[in-house]
Image: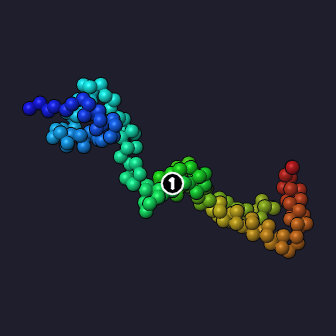
Amino acid sequence: MRINIPKNQLEQLYNINKKSIRYIASKFGCSNWVVLNRLEKFNLNVRSQNETKSIIYKGKNNPSYKHGKYTMKKRCKDCNKIISHNAERCHKCANKIIVKKRRQNEIIQHHIYLRENSNKTMILSRKNHALLHNNAYRYLYESQGKKGIDKYLKWFKKEYKIKD
């Protein structure tokens, strides 16, 4: 059985009223393919997927539309790029943090006493090594002020022959 879909009616429904192929097919009692073939036969432009989505998700049908307004797009905490709804950071920023955390947990050796070629060392993570030095500087600063730190750095450079 041949289904008759007039060109003017098809053009009215599809192009002017922006109805979907599925809607038109149900109206005429035929398959989506029949409607699609008629659109091509009558040289009517078939919408792209993006055009179709923009029509389907317009206004209240948009998944971002809730309680009378559009929800804000989620952004990366670090660089402010628009990201997916279930993430906190974009891939680039998340990878930076992963690498930083890995580096913090790397194990390194810390020399307690560098004179006399002694073997007195401690095994620390990179993070704890930094904390140890921060605490040492804080102690020097609190006990002797900025002059204490300057004095220590001057001694250290001289003792271990470090040039500026």
Q: Is residue 101 above or below residue 163?
A: below
On-image quarter of the N terminus:
top left
Most foreground residue, 164 or 54:
54
Q: Position of residue 51 (x, y in %)?
A: 39, 39
Number of marks in picture: 1
Is disc 1 surrounded by few (<14), some (14 to 19) or many (20+) residues within 10 Å? few
According to the picture, the residue beneath numbered tag 1 turns out to be 73
Q: Amino acid at mark 1?
A: Lys
Most foreground residue, 107 or 74:
74
Residue occupying the point 89% across, 62% down: 150
Position of 142 compared to 12: left or right? right
Most foreground residue, 53 or 89:
53
Position of 117 compared to 44: left or right? right
Residue occupying the point 14% across, 32% down: 3
Residue occupying the point 43% across, 56% down: 65
Q: Which corner quadrant of the image does residue 11 belong to?
A: top left
Residue 1 visible at all: yes
Q: Position of residue 71 (x, y in %)?
A: 48, 57
